[in-house]
Image (cartoon, rainbow, N blue to C red):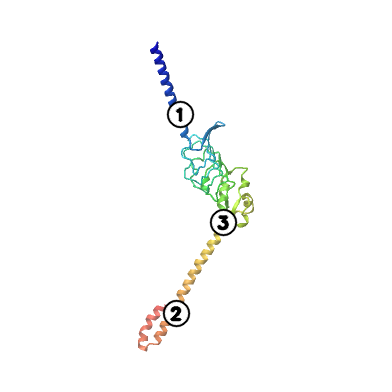
Amino acid sequence: MPFLDWYLRRSLATWLFFHSLVLMSLCFQSATTFPKGCYPSQEDGYKTLRCSNAQLTEVPRDIPNDTNRLYLDFNQITYLPSDAFRNLPVLMELDLSHNSLGHLDPTSLRGLTDHLHSLDLSSNKLVSVSKEVFANLKARTNLSGNPWMCDCELQEVIRLVDLDPGSSSAIVCSSSVQEEHAGKPFIQVVKEVDLCNVFRRTTDVAMLVTMFGWFAMVISYLVYYVRQNQEDARRHLEYLKSLPSKQRNSEEPSTLSTVV
């Protein structure tokens, strides 16, 4: 019996030891699975990762690939590189609001076009963005609160994107191709003028001015060239007249060929 009691106590201690190791391993793995400052949760049946106000300056690289909702709002992210979210095949909601994004790479959202339902880019520092960024994107998008340059490029983007209904009136022209539109909501500006027609007219005028400039330069050069040749011929003829008659007669044919 003493031996049996000793064996059982030793077996129980061994089991508890290994069980503790397993728990510690799982806890350590859980702590290192998620980026610093990010907290996982299960919300409405969706796997959510909240990295709000985590002092991030770039998109974390170790986001779990089964994340459905990703909140990166209230950070200092300044740039989205190419394929920033390529390893998130089931991401449905992406919140990048209240950051310092000033530029979007044309391929930064590549891979999210089929399944992303909601995209929040509000309250950043976006002045302009290429329409290629949103090519084939089906997500409802919030672009409000950015210092937009209202021009043809933005007009094409707005036509392409499925805007969040409550955000369209908050897309304000911080600057514009026409100064009188600065400070106005974009939806009001496009009711007054087609910015792409303005751009085309401006481009046409610029091309006409450039062509006229080149034409004037060519004409000026031709006039100068003709006058210079005439002046050289006149001087040569005067020179010939000043020569003795025999030498003048011998050089006149060459002078006539030069003038011709």
Q: Residue furthest top?
A: 1
Q: Secondary structure at mark 1?
A: helix
Residue 17, compared with residue 154, is above or below; it is above
User: Which residue corresponds to the image point at 49% horizontal and 72% vertical from the top-left?
Assistant: 220
Which amino acid does the dot numbered 1 rest on? Leu
State which tag comes first along the sequence, 3 or 1: 1
User: Which residue corresponds to the image point at 43% horizontal and 18% vertical from the top-left?
Assistant: 12
Where the N terminus falls, by quadrant?
top left
Residue 174, compared with residue 5, is above or below; it is below
As drawn, the label of residue 199 is 3
As drawn, the label of residue 231 is 2
Categorize mark 2 by other alpha carbons within 10 Å: few (<14), some (14-19), many (20+): few
Between 85 and 49, the one lying in front of the other is: 49
Which amino acid does the dot numbered 2 rest on? Glu
As drawn, the label of residue 26 is 1
Location of residue 253 by image quarter: bottom left
